[in-house]
Image (cartoon, rainbow, N blue to C red):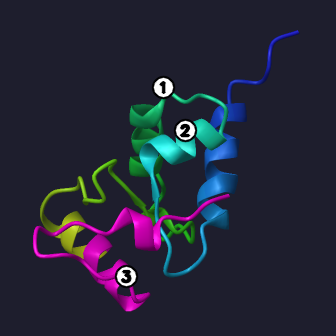
Amino acid sequence: MNEPIDTFRQRVFQIVDAIPRGRIATYGDVARLAGSPRAARQVGGILSRLPAGSRLPWHRVVNRLGGISLPGEDFIRQKTALEAEGVEFGPEGKIDLSRYRWVW
């Protein structure tokens, strides 16, 4: 019997919800933990479709270089939320993955 279609999405939600305050994970980390290591883009797609007002800490997921992939207002919103949790950005606008990356 096939798994329900929402299984991967639900696992993504559970993993992102478990990322502690002040820590980050990459889209690839979340995909790997959800059982599909090559699905980083799908993780981004799932998070981009969250309803307004979602309490899921989507802002704790960044790209593989420790950067924010979102443009404009969304970039500012994500950066502000991370800084409010004590996450620091380096001179190139990247987060030090060795310091802030969450390990499940």
> What is the secondary structure assignment of the residue under circle 1?
loop
The residue pinned by badge 2 equals: 31
Give the left or right position of residue 19, taking residue 50 as reference. Answer: right
> What is the secondary structure assignment of the residue under circle 3?
loop
Between 57 and 92, which is closer to the camera in this rendering?
Answer: 92
Question: What's the residue type where badge 2 is placed?
Answer: Ala
Quarter holding the C terminus?
A: bottom right
Q: Position of residue 52 (x, y in %)?
A: 44, 64
Q: Position of residue 37 (x, y in %)?
A: 54, 30
Between 64 and 21, which is closer to the camera in this rendering?
Answer: 64
Label 3 to label 2: alpha-carbon separation: 22 Å
Residue at 23 percent across and 53 percent down: it is: 69
**Residue 2: which quarter of the image?**
top right
Quarter holding the N terminus?
A: top right
Residue at 55 percent across and 80 percent down: it is: 21
Question: What's the residue type where badge 3 is placed?
Answer: Val
Let me know if residue 91 is in the magenta part.
yes
Q: Which residues are magenta?
A: 78-104
Residue at 77 percent across and 24 percent down: it is: 4
The residue pinned by badge 1 equals: 38
Asked if labels 1 and 2 touch by Cβ distance under 8 angstroms, the answer is yes
